[in-house]
Image (tube, rainbow, N blue to C red):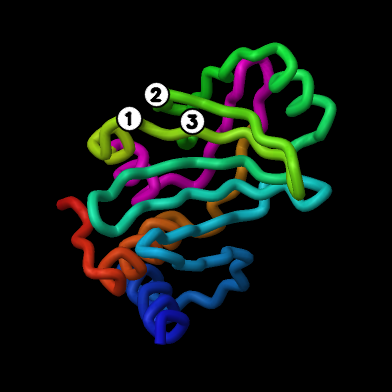
Amino acid sequence: MFTRLAMLALGAAFSAAGATAHAQLNISVTDRNGACFVAVPAGENGLRLEFSVRASDLNTNVVLHNVEGDYVNAGIESGEEPEIDLIFDGGHTHELDWGTFRAGFTYFVGGGWDEADGGHNVLRALRTASTVTFRAGDRRWENISLQTPGVAYALLENCVIQNGGDMMD
């Protein structure tokens, strides 16, 4: 059922432009335990950027998966948490409250906000943005394509509603 509704959300996003559009998108959407996840490819070697939103309170996190192991291991060994920023369409910078490195089955760097309200500006930016730059410490992954403006947001919104939540206005 969620997949069907996700496709309706895609149709609504395309219809909002007032014209029929055909596009092949490479966006994954999942939900588990009341949280919604949308991920887009972010480069070579399976690199992908994932936004997650907990339906009950809109707590938002962002993770860059499949980051180079040497970079993640160096971050873990340093004992420092990375400062993470998101920059949408080369514009305003959104600082995350916390960041972390993780190694295991995959290597990633990610973070979020201590209060749910902290992620709301990022969700608002997802409504219209075409690209996002993910910065963690001294590393930048630039101009990650969100493929079609508004689709990632529409998919998250649909999932949140499916899981009993309500997206912000």
Q: Is residue 12 visible?
A: yes
User: What's the mark number on residue 97?
Assistant: 2
- Taking the magenta stretch, the answer to whether it contains residue 128 is yes
Tag 1 secondary structure = loop
| CB contact under 8 Å: marks 2 and 1 | yes
Q: Is residue 146 left or right of residue 13?
A: right
Q: Three-letter amino acid code at disc 1?
A: Asp
Between the C-alphas of marks 2 and 1, the distance is 6 Å
Query: Which stretch appears magenta?
Result: 121-141
Q: Is residue 149 left or right of residue 158?
A: right
Please report whichever mark, 2 or 1, sits nearer to the chain's N-terminal start.
2
Q: Three-letter amino acid code at disc 3?
A: Leu
| CB contact under 8 Å: marks 1 and 3 | no
> Badge 2 local density, few (<14 within 10 Å), some, or many (20+)?
some
**Residue for point 38% across, 75% down:** 19
Between the C-alphas of marks 2 and 3, the distance is 12 Å
Between the C-alphas of marks 1 and 3, the distance is 16 Å
Q: Which quadrant would the N terminus be assigned to in this image?
A: bottom left
Residue highlighted by disc 3: 86
User: What's the mark number on residue 114?
Assistant: 1
Residue in front for this viewpoint, 16 or 137: 137
